């Protein structure tokens, strides 16, 4: 037996190889490839959308509006001159992301802070105490 015969086998293997080559040269891509490509494009679009959403929320995301009662309390404090009026600015309130403080001033002011600004007061890290 020569080395060539050992490598190729009985001939059935060689036929298979030719069949594969013809498939690869066919103009139409095989179904599995089209499905894979569609999946990859879908995953890619999803990742891009997630990144865009993340950047938007990081730059403009804010806490959810507190309950109306707290808003009213804060309004009274502002009317009495005991708290500064909060400036209106563009923020995207994130559902479920709300301040749990009982202090109306602290809560109302936190609704105008954007996620990108948390660290400037809280200094990052695990604790939330402002530095
Ligand atoms: C302008 C400065 C400032 C910014 C910006 C800010 N905070 Fe605060 N935050 C404070 C201060 C002051 C307190 C009250 C003092 C404290 O609890 O350390 C506080 C308190 C808190 C508390 C309660 C801490 C506790 O132990 O009771 C949380 C939670 C919190 N901030 C989260 C956030 C998040 C999330 C952001 C970003 C959206 C943010 N803060 C942005 C100044 C800020």
Image: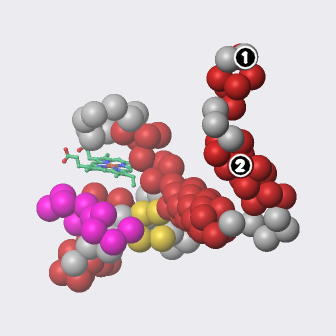
Q: What residue appears at the point 18 percent right and 58 percent down from the top-left corner?
A: 101
Most common secondary structure along the magenta stretch: loop
Location of residue 93 by image quarter: bottom left
Report the quarter where the C terminus lies: top left
Please tell me which residue is depicted at 69% across the width and 66% down the height of the picture: 30
As drawn, is 39 to the left or to the right of 114? right
- Element at badge 1? loop
Drawn side of residue 94 relative to residue 43, left or right: left
For label 2, the crowd category at 10 Å Cα-Cα, with few meaning under 14, some 14 to 19 and many 20 or more, is few
Identified at 67% across, 17% down, the residue is 1
- Cβ of mark 2 under 8 A from ligand 1: no
| Rendering coords of residue 15 (x, y %) | 71, 49
How many marks are shown on the rendered structure? 2
Q: Residue at x 26, y 73 (%)?
A: 66
Write down the residue under mark 1.
Answer: 2
Q: Is residue 5 above or below residue 44?
A: above
Residue 32 image-quadrant placement: bottom right
Disc 2 and disc 1: Cα gap in Å?
19 Å
Q: Residue furthest left?
A: 102
What is the crowding at mark 1: few (fewer than 14 residues within 10 Å), some, or many (at least 20)?
A: few
Q: On screen, 79 above or below 41?
A: below
Between 76 and 58, the residue placed more toward the observer is 58
| Range shown magenta | 94-104
Q: Is mark 1 within 8 Å of ligand 1?
A: no
Q: Which residue does the numbered mark 2 point to in the structure image?
A: 15
Please report contact status of discs 2 and 1: CB closer than 8 Å, yes or no.
Answer: no
Task: Report if residue 33 lies within the magenta region.
Answer: no
């Amino acid at each position: 037996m020569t080395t060539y015969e050992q490598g190729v086998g009985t001939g059935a293997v060689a036929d298979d190889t030719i069949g594969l080559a013809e498939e690869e040269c066919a103009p139409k891509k095989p179904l599995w490839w089209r499905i894979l490509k569609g999946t990859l494009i879908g995953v890619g679009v999803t990742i891009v959308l997630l990144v865009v959403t993340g950047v938007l929320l990081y730059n403009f995301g804010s806490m959810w509006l507190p309950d109306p009662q707290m808003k009213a309390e804060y309004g009274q404090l502002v009317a009495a001159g005991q708290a500064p009026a909060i400036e209106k600015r563009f923020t995207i309130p994130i559902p479920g992301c709300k301040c749990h403080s009982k202090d109306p001033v602290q809560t109302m002011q936190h609704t105008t802070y954007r996620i990108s600004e948390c660290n400037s007061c809280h200094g990052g890290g695990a604790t939330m105490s402002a530095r």
